[in-house]
Image (tube, rainbow, N blue to C red):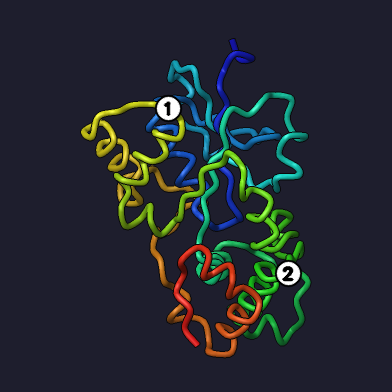
Amino acid sequence: MEETKKNIVIVGYPKSGTTWMSKLVAELLVCPLKGNWGFKIDNDPIEEGQDRISAYDCYKSHHTYEEIFSVDKKSIDKIIYIIRDPRDVVISGLYFFKFLKKSSIIDKLSPKAFKKKQMIKAVLSGNEKVNQWCKFSWKNHYNGYLNKDILFVKYEDLLQNPKFECQQILKFLNIEKTDKFILNAIDKQSFKNAKQTNNLRKGEAGYWKHQLSNSENQLFIEHLSNSLDYFGYEIIN
């Protein structure tokens, strides 16, 4: 039975809303969220709905496109990629990751500034010191998934217009659901009602406007202006 399942893998750069999206897609499909693609964690906090009977299984992944097909023997039916403004990825990451163990005394006196510096480095050029999944830059991570039979969903669009984005997800998967069903699934997996884990915070957009300095923002314009423009993200000089 397991081999006949259609495996849907939700992929994103760390701190892009991958856990939330995985839970929402599993809710829409009424299928189990089996955990992480390619490896198993005991008592994995993202697992959900293991008693659901479905032709589908959902998984979460931070793997690059080059890695994702070789880390698991199971086949992938569809990939959905969630993309988030890289500047908000930085802000979310500095509150989530714990990477002060080898920092200097000066860094420990200003841990937030240190974390922000490390997260900016991770997003712009990769930084495994933050986390193993941050060894690749934000751009290099999403770039491998472009121009393929893969649905890209913007985190910000999912926040602002969840019904429409869920309809696009279901259309991509060739599944029909009523508006009532979709709205109920959105409500169940909203940040307000979803069971909170360490992987879920507030679910907001635009943190960076208040927490990045002008010089920090300029780094993103210098390195990622084309990417920001491609995905329709605001560029403030």
Above or below 175: residue 172: below
Mark number, residue 174? 1
Amino acid bearing label 1: Asn
Rendered residue at 71%/39% (across/down): 68
Task: State the residue lying farthest toward the front.
Answer: 147
User: What's the CA distance linking mark 1 and mark 2?
Assistant: 37 Å
Closer to us: 197 or 67: 67
Q: In the shown orientation, is residue 100 left or right of residue 194? A: right
User: Residue 143 placed where, x, y %?
Assistant: 66, 55
Q: In the shown orientation, is residue 38 left or right of residue 233? A: right
Rendered residue at 44%/32% (across/down): 26
Q: Quadrant of residue 223?
A: bottom right
Q: In the shown orientation, is residue 226 left or right of residue 106? A: left
Rendered residue at 40%/66% (across/down): 205
Closer to us: 207 or 104: 207
Look at mark 2 in the image and give the residue it sits on.
125
Closer to us: 35 or 71: 71
Q: Residues within 10 Å of mark 2 (few under 14, many from 20)?
A: some
Q: Quadrant of residue 227?
A: bottom right
User: Residue 134 placed where, x, y %?
Assistant: 70, 59
Above or below 127: residue 79: above
Amino acid bearing label 2: Ser
Above or below 180: residue 211: below
